[in-house]
Image (tube, coloured by chain):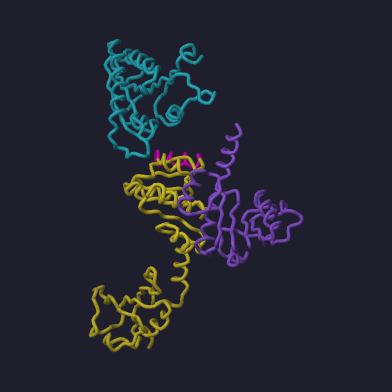
Amino acid sequence: MKVLIMGCSRVGAHLASLLETDGHEVTVLDVDPSGFGKLSHTFRGNALLGDGTDEDSLRRAGIEQMDAFVALTEADNTNIMAAQIAKSVFNVAKVVCRVYDPTREELYRELGLDTVCPTALIAASVKKRL
Amino acid sequence: MKFYRILAAVDGGDADKDAIQLACRLAKETKGQVFVVHVIEVKRSLPLNAELDNDAEQGQRILRRALDCANERDCTIETDLLQAREPGPAIVTEIVEKQIDLLLIGMSYRTKFGHFDIGETIPYVLKNAPCRVMILRQPLENDAK
Amino acid sequence: MYIVIVGAGNVGYHLAKAVLSKGHEVLLIDRDAATLERIEDELGSIGLNGDGCEANVLEEAGTARADLFVAVTDQDADNLVACQIAKHRFKVPRTVARMSDLKNEPLFKKLGVDVTVSSTILILQYIETQTSKPRLLTRLAVLRGSEREMVDVRIPPTAAVVGKKIRDISLPQNSLIILLIRQDERIQLPTSTTTLEAGDRVVVVGDRSSEEGLHQALTGS
């Protein structure tokens, strides 16, 4: 599977490693090259500079050939917009989007985005251990 | 210093009577006039002219208490109930329209998240009221401890 | 009308001021308290400090009773999300988003933003009308969702069409003269037997691609 990850955050870099270990082909896209340092030294995929809310950048990153797109920048709205572009402009089969704000996450889930909310996940996980 | 047209702004708190008593005493010196205003804050979810029966009733109660307090001191006051998004600008408008020369506001010692809290109205009128402004904070013994 | 505006930058400020002067109720939402305070000093209590993309802020703003929701921050993504929340969570009938990147227009429309505005587009249109050849042809409007446009052409005295009836003029395909303004400003609905005169202005609907041909047909000598 070909996967494009937008946002080379800790989570983005870690996900890239996990996917490569499973034999997937990974491309990482970020507006800031400093994040690429978080990638594992064994990373074989592409690391590209570019804005995931810009259709041309996405096209250059090869979004038209991707089977999956993951939006993992620190900004909810950037992730939401990029995920919607991947889904409705480029028809990427699998799109996952991180949204920190739980109410915003709920709304976009209702609107059909596949969302992950770290805030809700961590709170629930901590609560379970108390 | 003499005051002829005094406005007391009341919010229903304990400190209201302090402001009214002082307003009455200062007005007596000059045979001046005392006005008392209460502002109903209208949430943005409602239009400004919404009919807020509960708030209006409560506002009337607050103003009636002010009237009683003034009557005990043989002072006649004129009361006004206003509706606005924020009390500060409404009070300043009232000062201008009624040509007030002294604004009096009573306040109790409040804390919020462990810190002294002065709210938004008092800083606003201190910054924007064209007339003299007196803030009458209640002594700490009353409620701060 | 109740209008909620997100973004108190230059666009938001001037918009709020203009809309207030027309007698509408306005609320301006911005994350920067100092900016709002400056604006409120001038325009009164019309500000709400907070993130216009957060549902609880929009709730406090009374967005549910807004007739119009306008997002004009300088971030396209923020404007998109604010409009989507206003539309889907608070059922605002009309949402308007400012966008800087022209490519985003179809996306915004597809995702439920009713109107997009872009100063880039406006300035571009202006530049187009200013820089194209000695213009006897002015673009009045581009008809939405089609390749058609409406243009205004002044007939010069040297034009071959002067003195001709409309049915005898050959215009590019799909072009239609829909209005005639005589030199003395009289307005006429043209028929096939109307004769064109020097100094007439004609309003024509036609394909954008045949602008050149239209220009040539009406003004060429």
Q: Which residues are magenta?
A: C33-45
Chain coloured purple in the rendered structure: A
- Nearer the observer, C91 or C160: C91
Q: Give the x, y percent position of residue B131.
A: 39, 26
Looking at the picture, does residue A3 appear above or below residue B129?
below
* B122, B144: nearer the viewer: B144
**Is the magenta region chiefly helix, strand or loop?**
helix
Residue C44: in magenta span: yes
When the figure is inspected, residue C38 is found, relative to residue A92, above or below; the finding is above
Q: Which image quadrant for residue A20?
A: bottom right
Where, by quadrant of the figure, is residue B130 drawn? top left
Colour in which chain C is drawn: yellow
Percent x, y for residue A69? 59, 59
Q: Position of residue A82 (x, y in %)?
A: 55, 57
Q: Which chain is cyan?
A: B
Front position in the image: C101 or C211: C101
